[in-house]
Image: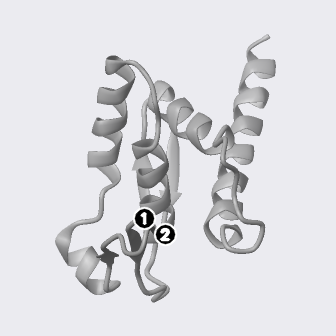
Amino acid sequence: MRLRLDFTQRINIHALMGQQRCNVDDIRAYWRLQDQIQLTKEEEKAINYQVIPAQNGMPQQATWNLNGHASSEYTFSAEDYDRIRKVVKEWQPGFLATGDRLWLEPLLAQFDGNEEKEKKKASAAN
């Protein structure tokens, strides 16, 4: 399964996977996926990616510039694709309607489009 991910989507999916509580095998799968989509040092520099240390009881915060960089296509096994889809769609703390729309809406459209393709493929096989 393929996903086209921009820097913001990669950063946010990486962060969501890092917040999962699960068994050791699932943790290893998340680590592998995080390694696959993690920004390179060159990419971090291109978007001025920074992690601001925790201050005054506030957690550390990542910041970066939205420079309109092109997205990259990633190919995932069906199992890994489902893992990514699940971590996004079932994120318990929820998302911000405005703040997360920029990266989340195009990602959800890809999930929906891929699910529709799979349904059509399954019905054609029957």
Q: Identify the amino acid type marked 1.
A: Pro
Q: Compared to 11, does 21 lie above or below?
A: above
Tell me which corner region of the image, top left, top right, bottom left or bottom right, holds residue 19: top left
Pair 1/2: label in front: 1
Q: Give the residue drawn at x 35%, y 84%.
A: 47
User: Which color scheme is applied?
Assistant: one colour
Return the residue nearer the eye: 103 or 60. 60
Q: Give the residue drawn at x 74%, y 20%.
A: 122
- Can you tell which mark lies on residue 8? 2
Tell me which corner region of the image, top left, top right, bottom left or bottom right, holds residue 29: top left
On the image, the x and y values in percent for residue 104 come to 65, 61
Instruction: Please tell me whether mark 2 sits on a helix, a strand or a loop.
Output: helix
Q: Identify the amino acid type marked 2.
A: Thr
Q: Compared to 70, does 65 lie above or below?
A: below
On the image, the x and y values in percent for residue 38 come to 30, 57
Q: Compared to 75, does 38 lie above or below?
A: below
Residue linked to disc 1: 59
In the image: residue 25, left or right of residue 117: left
Return the residue nearer the eye: 110 or 12. 12
Q: Compared to 36, does 27 lie above or below?
A: above
Q: Give the residue drawn at x 68%, y 42%.
A: 89
Instruction: Please tell me whether mark 1 sits on a helix, a strand or a loop.
Output: loop
On the image, the x and y values in percent for residue 62 come to 39, 72
In the image: residue 48, left or right of residue 82: left
Return the residue nearer the eye: 37 or 30. 30
Q: Give the residue drawn at x 81%, y 20%.
A: 123
